[in-house]
Amino acid sequence: MATIKDVAEKVGVSVTTVSRVLNNRGYLSEDLKRRVHEAMKELNYQPNELARSLFRKKSNIIGLIIPDISHPFFGEFAKHVEEQAYKNRYKILLCNSQLDNKKELDYISMLKASQVDGIIMGSHTLDTEEFTSINLPLVTLDRQLSDSIPYVSADHYKGGVLATKLLIRKGCRKIAHISGNLKLHLLAKTRYDGFMDTIKKAGIPHVVVETDLNGFKYHEYEQIVADLFRDHPDVDGVFASSDVIAAQVLKECRRLGKKVPDDVKVIGFDGIKLGEFITPELSTIQQPIKEIAKTSVKLLIDQINGKEVQRENILPVKLLEKETT
Amino acid sequence: MATIKDVAEKVGVSVTTVSRVLNNRGYLSEDLKRRVHEAMKELNYQPNELARSLFRKKSNIIGLIIPDISHPFFGEFAKHVEEQAYKNRYKILLCNSQLDNKKELDYISMLKASQVDGIIMGSHTLDTEEFTSINLPLVTLDRQLSDSIPYVSADHYKGGVLATKLLIRKGCRKIAHISGNLKLHLLAKTRYDGFMDTIKKAGIPHVVVETDLNGFKYHEYEQIVADLFRDHPDVDGVFASSDVIAAQVLKECRRLGKKVPDDVKVIGFDGIKLGEFITPELSTIQQPIKEIAKTSVKLLIDQINGKEVQRENILPVKLLEKETT
DNA sequence: ATATATATGTCAAGCGGTTGATATAAAAAC
DNA sequence: GTTTTTATATCAACCGCTTGACATATATAT
């Protein structure tokens, strides 16, 4: 790889001068600029970002920590994060934690050592204290940590309410909620709150089951859903806390010969693109994934640039009523 | 952030000594090591990877360029790439090209400037010449470029043959193949070859449609599938080149009142995890995604370490017969 | 004729590390 | 008692790039 020194020698000037051309600083004659750029082209020169970052104390890299990139929600989230980052000339260091506490910690320290300019945290197995020591611009997804760390989240509570109300309105007599794990202290937990508040007020029989902590192991869903219908065969409405789980519910219904939406009504959560391919088309609560990603990146970059940012960022959800309710 | 100098001062030795402890070089007394490590702990010191990489001319970063991280195939691929990279202490710089030629080129130059140690290319809008100038360890996914660049791919031809044979065996009289775009020169194209060779030999009426170049725009699938059944209402077997497209076929069949598998038999390709959630369960040709990822990372790291690697790496596919055939 | 602004360019230090060469002292070998 | 080995630690150069300070020359203003 050619270095700035090679370019300087080729043109017959000092490296300082080349650097000045590179960064457009000071007075440079057009002729000089031309000569330098020509030499760069010829040598196929590219400035070494490592060296630049080292000097500038700015890497233009954002760390993205999520539980599972192959999960559609996080896949879409990551895609939009990348898009926004790219627009702002930031690169993404991808960290897949698999909800493994050790890996998450390890990644945080790797990211710090790599001098990333900030971190978007979408995986949350850590305690608050471990976070406050990160000492780097931070944005969390779906989790409220300390006073100083901004977070972005969909309005899960509202989503829980909307979903539950829909099932009630459609005449369900016994409604099940398959919740994500409640021990993770995620804001997604408020879907559960929305469900409970609504269903209690309506006085309708209900049952809640919770998924494990093991992080998106799909085969687990099968068991949970099967158990649910075994233990509660009279359930005629299901509010699943993700579209993937909802799809599993549809599958189980088919296996049991229950017709959707006639015998059982089902509503999911997330509004992932792939949901459109499910038959019958899945009713769901749509999170504004792109907006969430956009906001996360913006909050992070604003922090990096020393701006004050808003702590709470709750974005609206939307009820998408399709064929399963 | 504390630097090596801070540590040195605190312990009362030179930075060289601290560096030696850090890298375990030369003779160090146990006592010294202890004192240095203590000071690091206290100062919350972490070596600056930028500086280390600069000196070592090795960043321990791998660039991963794919068309769309939110597409299930690439999501799963990326997940496994990350897993393997992590095991080998490499970090992943995520590049989502959206099959945009300009973005792809831009990312390649960003990656070079960032001094990545190698690139895994899963997005292919570039010509061969543009690649040979990359001058960095490289592995391509599904594309055969030059003699010197190793590639990893599933045995798409075999997959095409298996899928077609299954549809024939099940008694289909007119079979459609919805192919990925054939202009991209991907090895995935050989699914088409496998289909054509097999169906011609069997002498069965068939029709082939091709998706656009626009890169995983799902809404496009809807039109293509609708057109297919409009123009060829007598099609009773469909070999789709991805599970996502196959799902769209199922959806359209339902809309048209065609029963699957009675009226129309459908088989997909990829074997994505989410395929299991489709009802009826989708028959498909499963790519060994994890193995593909593992091989890609291994080939890349071997190259980085100066080893000779095998150019052609074709991994076996597997027919998964479920409910749609 | 002198001060001031404009233009062109270089020196050298520094970003945070690593390492070959080198110095010094004590222990072991001859 | 001298040489060799082992142990401990430092100096200074370097990785590739940036920038404040400084030097010099020309054009413009006073």
Image: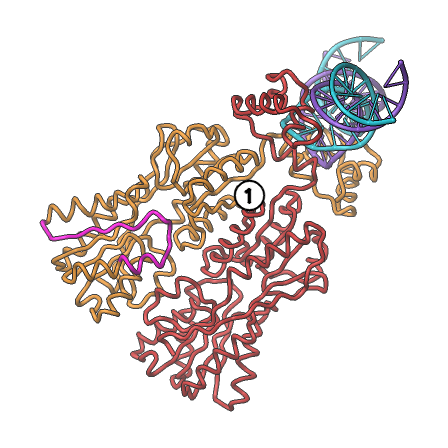
Chain colours: A orange, B red, C cyan, D purple
Quadrant holding the N terminus of chain A: top right
Q: Residue at x 53, y 37 (%)?
A: A111
Magenta-colored stretch includes residue A216: yes
In the shown orientation, is residue D2 left or right of residue B59? right
On the image, which quarter does residue A91 sit in? Answer: top right
Q: Is residue B243 above or below residue B325?
A: above
**In x, y percent, where is residue B49?**
61, 35
In this view, A207 is above or below B193: above
Left or right for D14, reference A200:
right
Residue at 56% over, 21% down: B39
Q: Position of residue A176 (x, y in %)?
A: 19, 55
Q: Nearer the viewer, residue A318 or D15?
A: D15
Between residue A139 and residue A122, name the one nearer to us.
A122
**Which of the 4 image quarters holds residue D3?**
top right
The quarter of the image holding the C terminus of chain A is bottom left
Q: Is residue A107 above or below residue B268?
A: above
Q: What is the quadrant of residue B300 in the picture?
A: bottom right
Residue B254 coordinates in the image, percent (x, y): 31, 75
Numbered circles on residues, count? 1
Q: Which residue is mark 1?
A: A91
Disc 1 crowd, CA 10 A, few/some/many (<14, 14-19, 20+): many
Q: Residue at x 50, y 70 (%)?
A: B211
Label 1 sits on a secondary structure element that is: strand
Of residues A87 and B163, the one nearer the viewer is: B163
In screen coordinates, is B26 left or right of A140? right
Write the start and end of the magenta stretch as one range: A203-224
Amino acid type for the residue under numbered disc 1? Lys
Chain identifier of the residue bearing label 1 in the image? A
The answer to if B234 sits in the magenta stretch is: no
Coordinates of residue A163 in the picture (x, y in percent)? 22, 53
